[in-house]
Structure formats: C-alpha cells, structure tokens
Image (cartoon, rainbow, N blue to C red):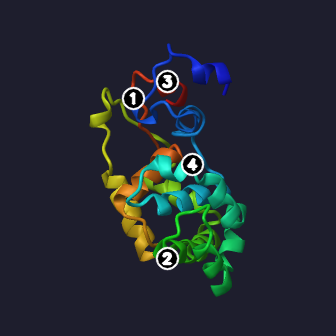
Amino acid sequence: MNKSKIKSKNILRCPWCGSSEKMIQYHDEEWGVIVRDDKKLFEYLVLDTFQAGLSWSTILHRREGFKNAFANFDVKKVARFTELDYNRLLQDEGIIRNKLKIRATISNAQAFINIQKEYGSFSEYIWQFSDGKPIINKWIEQKDVPSRSQVSDAMSKSLKKRGFKFVGSTICYAFMQASGMVNDHLSSCFRYNTLS
C-alpha cells in the first residue's frame, strides 16, 4: 500500500483504525483480505488468542515480538515447544506474558496440525464455516458491526470440541474479519468495494 495513501486525509476508512500508522496500515493492507494460507491463518489464530480481553492495538504493536517468540509462526515448531520454551516465553517482554494464553497457543498448534492431517489443510477446514467464500456485509456505522455471528458460534463450538482454547465466538469473529471470511469494512470505507 502506498505511503501517501496512508497519509491522505481524503480517504474514508473504518473509524476503528484511528490515527495510529500501524493500525491504518493493518486496516488498509490486511484486514478483510482473503487468507487461505495455513501459516498466515495460524498467525492470526495466535494473535487473536492473545487478544482475548485486550485491544487489537495492544496486540498489533507487539506483533514482531509474537513473531520472534513463536518461531515465526511455524506451527510445527510451536507444537513441539517444551516446558523450557514455556518458561522462556513467560520471561519474554515482547509478548503478553499470560500463562494460560501461552499454554493455549502451544496446545492450539498441536490441534491445528491434527486438523491439517484430517482435512489436508487448516484452510480447508476453517473456510467450510462460510461455505468457502467471504460473507459480504453492508454496514453503515461502526456500531452496526457485530462482535459475533451464528457462523462464529458454530466455528467456536467446533474448535473447542477439537481441543482449542481461547476460541470463544467473539475471538472467532475477529479471526473471520482478519482472514477475510467476512467483509466488515463499512460500506463507505475505501476498502469495502475492493474486497467485495
């Protein structure tokens, strides 16, 4: 995305990205873009796990720290993390040092691999919840955008049954928004039509 586009005052964006350059860049380049690559889907899963109860801005500003801490989001490496790795992560100031979320990320990596073995890819499994295509919404105001849906409810239930943790419906919906399974850009946002 062109830097001048980020700076431009004339572009209409979803108000949640505010004025933070990191948030604007994430909004303009990533949020709502269709992702079918398992590595990227695992990254979003990790970041959303840590987001539970926190703002997206808090997580986004530590993204590089999470990348370094969790082996560049290599799911196979994370699935093999030992107690030594767990203790290292507890000391890592580059991430949110939450014991339960760290444990969950390691066990989620193992559950992620089990799904890959069963479906051929995590993407194949996760995209079935939206029938393999993005759900296109047409919201006018930010307050209209929901924090969960019947689809995220079903996804959450399925993931929990498969052993995932920190995958409540709200977290699943945020994951859907990030990975392009749902287009929740406001209809006035410049990104809405480019992703519909």
Residue ID at (51%, 58%)? 126
Q: Which x, y percent locates residue 187?
A: 39, 25
Identify the residue position indicated by label 2 in the image.
99
Amino acid beneath label 3: Asn
The front one of 125 and 1 is 1
* Residue at numbered disc 4: 61
Q: Residues within 10 Å of mark 3 (few under 14, many from 20)?
A: few
Q: Residue at x 65, y 77 (%)?
A: 88
Q: Nearer the viewer, mark 4 or mark 3?
A: 4
Determine whether label 2 and label 4 are within 8 Å by CB: no
Which residue is under mark 1? 186
Of the numbered discs 2 and 3, the one sitting upstream in the chain is 2
| Residue lying at 72% horizontally and 66% vertically, measured from the top left | 71
Q: SS of the residue at dot 2? A: helix
Query: Would residue 16 be found to the left or right of residue 77 on screen?
Result: left
Q: Real-space Cα distance between discs 3 and 1?
A: 10 Å
Identify the secondary structure beneath mark 1.
Answer: loop
Side (left or right) of 57 relative to 80:
left
| Few, some or many residues within 10 Å of mark 2 (<14, 14–19, 20+) | few
State the separation of the CA atoms marked 2 and 4: 20 Å
